[in-house]
């Protein structure tokens, strides 16, 4: 029982990590809380589902969603965030929330308000670990998540692109002066983060076997909590916080029968954390 | 009175939204502190009144006062948090408070869970329970009072301190303004007013449930204040009136309400971040030019 709960907590935590990673990347380079990231995530799920229904290929669905949402993210940056960077911080935040509400309603109008099932055939069978049994779908989700997280780690830490992001995050003007192509680095950052969110959308759709317009609602704000818990802008902190949250939620809800609803746990943890250690798990100080 | 019931309902709702937008304006407009969970305080006020009047038979106005005090007390706590947690972090915290408060209403038996609380009485004057038109009078009087309070705040030392806090917190501290005290005060005042609005809302609906106070309402209130112009008094008033009546006047807007609100927020932020009637906005500049032109032509003739 406990092992089963642990495994399912890890699966959920991994998906949280994928979504939150895009947010952290964006916050790192632009200092914007990208609430509309969740709209990108829901759009990814729909693009993936539509592609899957048409072609029957899960790989094609993942690819199409990643490309479409990558472009979507770049457009959001180009037309909404870019021009607002010199405004007070609350301005891009409100714009982001507006954008999220807009696209969520847009999805509802295009695809209808009802949940659609995502009956994906995955290339994995049942995995028996002895203490816990993982259905093929969960194996698929876990494997995809881990591969993408590893890829993200590689890009951020071992490539010139990741180095450019880190330079922009530390001091954008200085980075520009040192010859880092800042606008391009930021655009690719959005592309990359949004593509991850799109894949996460598909994975969540498969996990719960349902895709619906409001599916971005909870992640939109819960992932902000994860990002803050991990220390805004800290990539390892975010991943750790995401896995922790997935585990704590699953264990508290499934094992202890906690009094609070699942979705409030993240915020209670967040408020406690901000009061005790405002810089987050892995933050570098200065809230 | 022969005003159709529909107009009275619309006027009451618009009035309550106006109070909410103005009370948020004290926190976010005057003091410049993000608050994306204003609906939580509205809800705390509504639930306080509902529980006190239906279960403990507390007199109406005492319960309404308690509603304002309860919301203001939780708001002061948020104010204390805002001393440690700034800007983006504070915005997320306020969102979190909204979710936590709603889930407490939803899951704790004391608050009636998903069933909500019903049979909430109307306000009474001289032992006589008011009707809907009577409630409308109370709401209008409250709006006038909140406008008056906002004006007083704006013109006082308190208002100046808040403005300095908004523009440059460190500079304000450097010239000896006790920013901590003023921040907490702004949160306390704004949330207490929202709590009182919640009490009026609970009476008006006579039945409340957790779904009435969720995060989208916070965004709606914010949207009203922002579209009108944060930091002014005319802005939130006009924003609240326009955005509450818009879905009624244009029926088609009703089905696309979130689409319209979301789109409006993005467009406003992109084109006119200070709001339609904010300082230095397009409309205000036009008004200024028109007045200047009139003065000049008067001088010529």
Image (spheres, coloured by chain):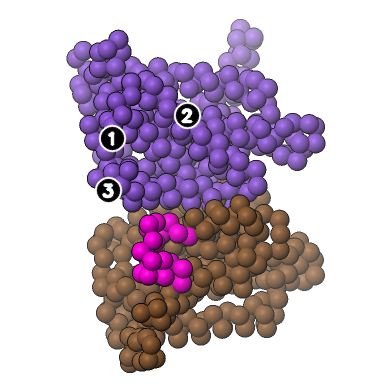
Q: Is residue B243 above or below residue A56?
A: above
- Residue A166 on image: x %, y %: 70, 71
Q: How crowded is mark 3: few (under 14 residues within 10 Å), some or many (20 or more)?
A: some
In the rendered image of the structure, the colour used to display chain A is: brown
C-beta proximity under 8 Å, tags 3 and 1: no
Tag 1, which chain? B
Mark 3, residue position: B114
Q: How crowded is mark 2: few (under 14 residues within 10 Å), some or many (20 or more)?
A: many
Quadrant of the image occupied by residue B271: top right
Which residue is depicted at the point 22% across and 31% down? B119
Look at the image and give the residue range highlighted in magenta: A247-266
Element class at badge 1: helix
Mark 1, residue position: B248
Which residue is depicted at the point 62% across and 83% down? A154
Which residue is depicted at the point 43% across and 74% down? A9
Which residue is depicted at the point 39% across and 25% down? B64
Element class at badge 3: helix
Disc number for residue B144 = none
Q: In this view, does A276 lie above or below B68?
A: below
């Amino acid at each position: 029982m406990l092992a089963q709960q642990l495994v399912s907590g890890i699966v959920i935590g991994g998906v949280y990590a994928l979504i939150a990673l895009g947010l952290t990347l964006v916050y790192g380079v632009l200092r914007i809380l990208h609430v509309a990231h969740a709209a990108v995530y829901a759009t990814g799920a729909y693009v993936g589902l539509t592609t899957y229904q048409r072609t029957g290929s899960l790989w094609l669905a993942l690819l199409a969603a990643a490309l479409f949402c990558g472009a979507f993210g770049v457009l959001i940056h180009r037309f909404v965030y870019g021009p607002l960077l010199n405004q007070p911080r609350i301005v891009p935040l409100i714009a982001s929330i507006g954008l999220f509400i807009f696209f969520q309603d847009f999805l509802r109008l295009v695809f209808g308000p009802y949940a659609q099932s995502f009956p994906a055939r995955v290339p994995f069978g049942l995995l028996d670990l002895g203490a816990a049994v993982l259905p093929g779908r969960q194996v698929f989700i876990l494997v995809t998540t881990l591969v993408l997280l590893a890829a993200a780690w590689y890009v951020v830490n071992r490539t010139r692109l990741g180095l450019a992001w880190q330079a922009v995050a530390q001091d954008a003007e200085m980075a520009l002066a040192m010859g880092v192509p800042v606008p391009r680095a930021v655009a690719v950052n959005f592309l990359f983060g949004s593509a991850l969110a799109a894949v996460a959308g598909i994975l969540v759709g498969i996990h719960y076997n349902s895709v619906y317009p409001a599916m971005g609602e909870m992640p939109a704000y819960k992932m902000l909590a994860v990002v803050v818990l991990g220390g805004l802008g800290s990539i390892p902190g975010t991943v750790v916080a995401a896995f922790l949250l997935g585990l704590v939620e699953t264990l508290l809800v499934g094992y202890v029968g906690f009094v609070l609803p699942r979705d409030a746990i993240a915020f209670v943890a967040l408020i406690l954390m901000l009061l005790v250690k405002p810089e987050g798990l892995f933050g570098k100080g200065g809230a | 009175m022969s005003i159709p019931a529909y107009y009275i309902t619309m006027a009451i709702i618009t009035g309550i939204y106006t109070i909410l937008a103005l009370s948020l304006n004290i926190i976010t407009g005057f003091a410049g502190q993000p608050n994306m969970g204003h609906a939580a305080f509205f809800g705390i006020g509504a639930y306080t009144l509902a529980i006190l009047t239906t279960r403990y038979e507390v007199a109406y106005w005492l319960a309404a006062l308690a509603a304002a005090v309860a919301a203001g007390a939780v708001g002061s706590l948020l104010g204390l948090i805002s001393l440690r947690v700034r800007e983006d972090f504070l915005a997320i915290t306020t969102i979190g408070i909204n979710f936590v408060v709603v889930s407490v209403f939803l899951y704790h038996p004391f608050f009636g869970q998903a069933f909500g609380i019903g049979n909430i009485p109307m306000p009474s004057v001289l032992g006589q329970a008011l009707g809907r038109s009577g409630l409308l009078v109370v709401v209008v009087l409250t709006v006038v009072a909140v406008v008056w309070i906002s004006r007083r705040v704006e013109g006082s030392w308190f208002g100046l301190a808040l403005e300095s806090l908004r523009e440059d917190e460190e500079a304000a501290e450097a010239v000896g303004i006790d920013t901590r005290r003023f921040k907490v005060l702004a949160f306390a005042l704004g949330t207490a007013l929202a709590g009182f609005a919640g009490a009026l809302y609970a009476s008006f609906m006579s039945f409340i449930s957790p779904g009435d106070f969720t995060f989208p309402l916070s965004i709606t209130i914010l949207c009203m204040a922002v579209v009108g112009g944060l930091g002014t008094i005319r802005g939130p008033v006009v924003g609240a009136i326009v955005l509450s009546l818009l879905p009624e006047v244009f029926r088609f807007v009703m089905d696309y309400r979130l689409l319209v609100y979301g789109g409006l927020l993005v467009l406003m932020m992109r084109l006119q971040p200070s709001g339609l009637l904010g300082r230095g906005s397009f409309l205000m500049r036009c008004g200024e030019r028109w007045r200047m032109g009139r003065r000049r032509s008067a001088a010529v003739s």
